[in-house]
Image (cartoon, rainbow, N blue to C red):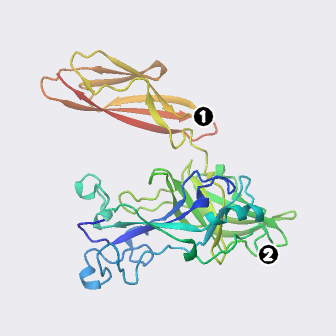
């Protein structure tokens, strides 16, 4: 694409098909890309930081050709901030690594098969969201290029994570009591006590971001800390924890702190870059309303209300209500001097024209909100806004 301002930074993603499998033996149904966002505070670190300070390309020679084929970014190009993960296999629903027979059936899907990237210009550093200057966040459309299997030299065969001889000997790999806290997460790899070395060189935490792009993606949040092993009988639990407070990176790219309902995975990697992913698990209490829930109305909101318009009523709800939680609704008007919004029994919202519009059009925004609640779930809400014109 083209841009009227110089590119100063970017983010990078790698696509692994196995990350989209709810269980390593199942078909891909979820997000497959891990997005490595820009570093915080726009530092000039070479890994996903600024290529150079804004408007400095004339003097620093870091942006030596225009964005497009042949682009050269000197020594500070886009690089993932962790050692390259050459393969990822997801465990079974019970947390067990796949058997040798099972890994043989998914070998073609364990390597990264494409790289995706976005570029940013100076507008990405803006703090205002109210001006045309910052409305598009200074972010390019997503660029994508395939990675061919021959470009990733290993592994020739999928790693057998269950093998304790020359391997990890892992029995299970999963979050430990993920519903116990919304501020931190602990993952445990269970082996026998005969293993004396941690099964992973590093453990990376990723979070599902369903609205980022079509199909969603995984946000890389950071590396978990190894806090030692815990022995119980003949089992040894290798423990990895992480607390995440978020990173503000500019409009459209702030990474939120851990919160109830976050969908997380841990990817344990060995020194060769082989990765073993947990299944997706929910941090803290799961949200009452699922991520794909939306407000529903039994009757659509009229686009216009005249001075003499009859009262309009609609029942406000949300779907899907997968968890069968209690639903409470509310509706509000941005201009109650000309259109009132009243919530009544049965989650029925009534809109009534009031006052007198003598000429022209008075714009009104009606906001419908549905809140889901039930014991064992995190209370959360979804909203929908309808634009209405009050006319004479």
Q: Closer to the camera, 23 or 368?
A: 23
Q: Closer to the camera, 385 or 241?
A: 385
Q: Which mark is residue 292?
A: none
* Left or right of 83, for residue 132: left
Can residue 99 be seen here? The reply is: no
The x, y position of residue 295, in whole percent, is 45, 33
* Left or right of 164, for residue 374: left
Can residue 312 be seen here? The reply is: yes
Quarter of the image where the C terminus is located: top left
- Mark sitting earlier along the chain (1/2): 2
**345 lies above or below 211:** above
Q: Closer to the camera, 188 or 315?
A: 315
Q: Residue at x 31, y 73 (%)?
A: 67
The x, y position of residue 59, in whole percent, is 25, 84
Quarter of the image where the N terminus is located: bottom left
Q: Residue at x 26, y 51 (%)?
A: 130
Q: Secondary structure at mark 1?
A: loop
Binning the other alpha carbons within 10 Å of mark 1 as few (below 14), some (14 to 19) or many (20 upward) gives some
The x, y position of residue 224, in whole percent, is 61, 67
Q: Secondary structure at mark 2?
A: loop
Q: Residue at x 58, y 50 (%)?
A: 29
Residue identifier under label 1: 374
Q: Quadrant of residue 373?
A: top right
Tally the numbered discs. 2
Q: Quadrant of residue 184?
A: bottom right
**345 lies above or below 46:** above
**212 lies above or below 168:** above
Residue identifier under label 2: 196
* Left or right of 129, for residue 282: right
Q: Quadrant of residue 212?
A: bottom left
Residue at the outermost right position: 233
The x, y position of residue 43, in whole percent, is 39, 74
């Amino acid at each position: 694409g083209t841009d009227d301002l110089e590119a100063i930074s970017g983010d990078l993603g790698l696509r692994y098909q196995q990350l989209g499998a709810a269980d390593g033996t199942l078909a891909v149904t979820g997000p497959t890309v891990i997005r490595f966002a820009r570093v915080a505070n726009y530092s000039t670190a070479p890994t996903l930081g600024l290529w150079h300070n804004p408007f400095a390309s004339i003097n620093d020679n870091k942006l030596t050709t225009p964005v497009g084929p042949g682009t050269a970014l000197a020594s500070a190009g886009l690089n993932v901030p962790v050692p390259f993960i050459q393969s990822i296999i997801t465990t079974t629903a019970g947390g067990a690594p796949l058997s040798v027979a099972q890994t043989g059936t998914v070998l073609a899907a364990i390597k990264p098969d494409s790289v995706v990237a976005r570029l940013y210009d100076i507008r990405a550093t803006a703090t205002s969201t109210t001006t045309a200057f910052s409305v598009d966040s200074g972010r390019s459309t997503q660029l994508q290029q395939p990675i061919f299997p021959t470009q990733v030299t290993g592994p020739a065969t999928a790693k057998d994570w269950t093998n304790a001889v020359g391997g990890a000997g892992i029995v299970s790999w999963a979050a430990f009591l993920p519903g116990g806290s919304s501020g931190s997460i602990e993952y445990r790899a269970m082996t026998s006590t005969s293993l004396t070395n941690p099964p992973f060189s590093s453990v990376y935490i990723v979070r599902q971001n369903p609205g980022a792009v079509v199909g969603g993606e995984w946000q890389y949040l950071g590396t978990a800390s190894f806090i030692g092993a815990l022995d119980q009988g003949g089992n040894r639990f290798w423990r990895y924890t992480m607390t995440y407070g978020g990173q503000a990176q500019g409009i459209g790219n702030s990474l939120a702190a851990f919160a109830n309902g976050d969908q997380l995975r841990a990817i344990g990697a060995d020194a060769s870059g082989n990765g073993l992913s947990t299944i997706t698990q929910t941090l803290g209490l799961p949200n009452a309303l699922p991520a794909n829930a939306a407000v529903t109305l039994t009757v659509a909101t009229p686009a216009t209300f005249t001075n003499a318009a009859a009262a309009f009523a609609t029942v406000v709800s949300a779907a899907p209500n997968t968890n069968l939680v209690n639903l409470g609704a509310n509706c509000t008007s941005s201009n109650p001097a000309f259109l009132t919004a009243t919530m009544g029994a049965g989650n029925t919202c009534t809109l009534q024209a009031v006052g007198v519009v003598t000429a022209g059009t008075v714009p009104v925004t009606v906001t419908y909100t549905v809140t889901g609640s039930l014991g064992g779930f995190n209370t959360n809400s979804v909203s929908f806004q309808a634009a209405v014109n009050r006319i004479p």
